[in-house]
Image (cartoon, rainbow, N blue to C red):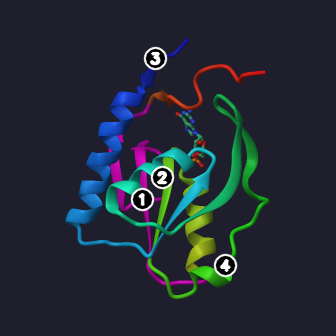
Amino acid sequence: EQEREVLTWVTFGDASRDLTKKIVDDGFVPDIVIAIARGGLIPAGAIAYAMGVKAAGTLNVEFYSDIEETLPDPVVLEPLLDTDAIVGKKLLVVDDVADSGRTLALVIDLLKAHTPDVRSAVIYTKPRTIVQPDYSWRETDKWINFPWSTLPVIT
Ligand code: 5GP
């Protein structure tokens, strides 16, 4: 078993406030916060509340099927984002982590086809990422246990 980076709910609360402060201090106020589902849903909600942005959307992407077990490529899943609604809007794309960065790269490319100002925020960045997020809370090369995906599924 390799060592893990464990993010608790309490630390996540502080992380989302710290990350939002970085974005606000940079003078960036998005029109819409876009969560990359599912990993970015909870971070995006926390950031949207922390910055007082009410407009939120989601883009559903799957890449990891299990711990360190990936599909060949990240794929966009249904339900799809209404791309007409984002034309000309300033977007903040939020995910839990930029690991390979391939999910973020796919989403940024897709959104930039519809609007020019697309920035990204993640809780964690790993050193190997192919895209550097605009805003990141911390860097790690460990596997991260997020509080929302660590406990077993309730059946
Ligand atoms: P990518 O390799 O495309 O940057 O990562 C895609 C997604 O895989 C992330 O948004 C996240 O949901 C999941 N993922 C990647 N690395 C980790 C990790 O260290 N821990 C957890 N729990 N999920 C990860």
> In the rendered view, would you say 67 is above or below 57?
above
Q: Disc 1 to disc 3, how far (Cα)?
A: 31 Å
Q: Residue at x 44, y 79 (%)?
A: 117
Disc 2 and disc 1 in contact, CB within 8 angstroms: yes
Residue at disc 2, secondary structure: helix
Query: Which amino acid type is marked by label 4?
Result: Thr
Residue 116 lies in magenta, yes or no? yes
Specify which label sits upstream in the sequence, 4 or 3. Answer: 3
Q: Which residue ends up furthest to the left in the rendered image?
A: 25
| Cβ of mark 3 under 8 A from ligand 1 | no
Residue corresponding to mark 3: 3
x, y percentage for residue 44? 48, 53
x, y percentage for residue 73? 73, 52
Q: Residue at x 62, y 63 (%)?
A: 106
Q: Badge 4: how crowded within 10 Å, few (<14), some, or many (20+)?
A: few
User: As rendered, which of 138 and 35 lies closer to the eye?
Assistant: 35
x, y percentage for residue 141? 43, 33
